[in-house]
Amino acid sequence: MKRRQALKSFISASLLSFIPFKNLLAKDECVTTDDILGPYFIEGAPNISVIAPEIPDVNRLFITGTLYAKDCVTPVPNALIDVWQANNEGAYEDIDYRGKIYTDESGNYAFESIQPGKYLNGSYYRPSHIHFKIQYLNNPELVTQLYFEGDTTLDIDPWASDPSAVDRIIPLTTDDNNNANGVFDIYLNVDVDTVNLNHYDRNDIPSRIESISPNPISEQFEIRFYNSTNALVTVDICDVMGRETKVLFEQKCTNKLHQITLNKPELRAGVYILRLSVNGRKVDAKRLLLK
Ligand SMILES: [Fe+2]
């Protein structure tokens, strides 16, 4: 409840620029790399998104993201994401700390957990990590792992230190409740042709954010959003507590899919929330990472 209340307030951001659309990423450049399955995957995990029990004095971890096809911008709905991790003491359990999550119609997923503990792999500790296994229709599944910036054993871990893992090492932002927040967008090596695309010729599709790319953001980035009516559209950014909003884009827009390119806001690195409003009413939000 505290988090929800906090989301009503706001953050400082900067800038606003409107540049004709261009592709910021070449096709396939964004595809998320794989990692080892490890020995602790169990079929048939519970269909839950709160995968860790409450533990006294252990803060919660919130991970959110969007699943995209290999064009880097088309959301993949109704994909199955298995997540599993060690508990805070570095031990895997049969029931807890694992769950099956499905992406929503905009490709979004989210789960709540705790920071995984480290465990010994031979003579060294593996860095804190969360395992992912993602299945979409009959496409080959993606098995991978998520790591966290600042972890002191990233460099000695053969998998986390592999250059291909760099986009899977994310920063975490601590909110006022001492909960950690991270965003991990996942790019599947699947063709857009296989994705059940949104049909914007229907008149019952609500306005929403389609994609933010690239994400994490280091310079310019592109937003695609669908607007369902002729209206004043506002895109703003705030921190995970919903504070200090900064408007990035505000313009009358027609009812169609729009693509705009923005410069990176001058904010410190971390997790932020990009929000879409239509005629002053907030209609959608996605998380993003500023590098
Ligand atoms: Fe593991």
Image (cartoon, rainbow, N blue to C red):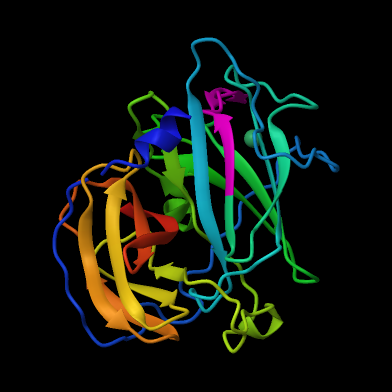
Q: Let me know if residue 124 is in the magenta part.
A: yes
Tell me which residue sits at (47%, 51%) in the image: 168
- Choose top left, top right, bottom left or bottom right for residue 214: bottom left
Q: Quadrant of residue 284?
A: bottom left
State whether residue 158 is above or below residue 72: above
Q: Is residue 86 visible?
A: yes
Q: Residue furthest top?
A: 56
Residue found farthest to the right = 44
- Looking at the picture, how far across and down is residue 272, in whole percent? 33, 49
Query: Looking at the image, in which quadrant does ligand 1 appear?
Result: top right
Vertical placement of 166 versus 189: above or below? above
Image quadrant of residue 55? top right
Residue 36 at x, y = what percent? Answer: 66, 48
32 sits left or right of 136 in the view: left
Q: Is residue 42 above or below residue 205?
A: above
Residue 264 in sight here:
no
Looking at this view, is 187 or 195 the one in front?
A: 195
Residue occupying the point 36% across, 59% down: 275
In the picture provided, is 219 more to the left or to the right than 227? left
Q: Which residues are magenta?
A: 110-125
**Percent x, y of residue 189:** 62, 72
Q: Is residue 143 magenta?
A: no
Question: Of 63 and 117, which appears nearest the observer?
Answer: 63
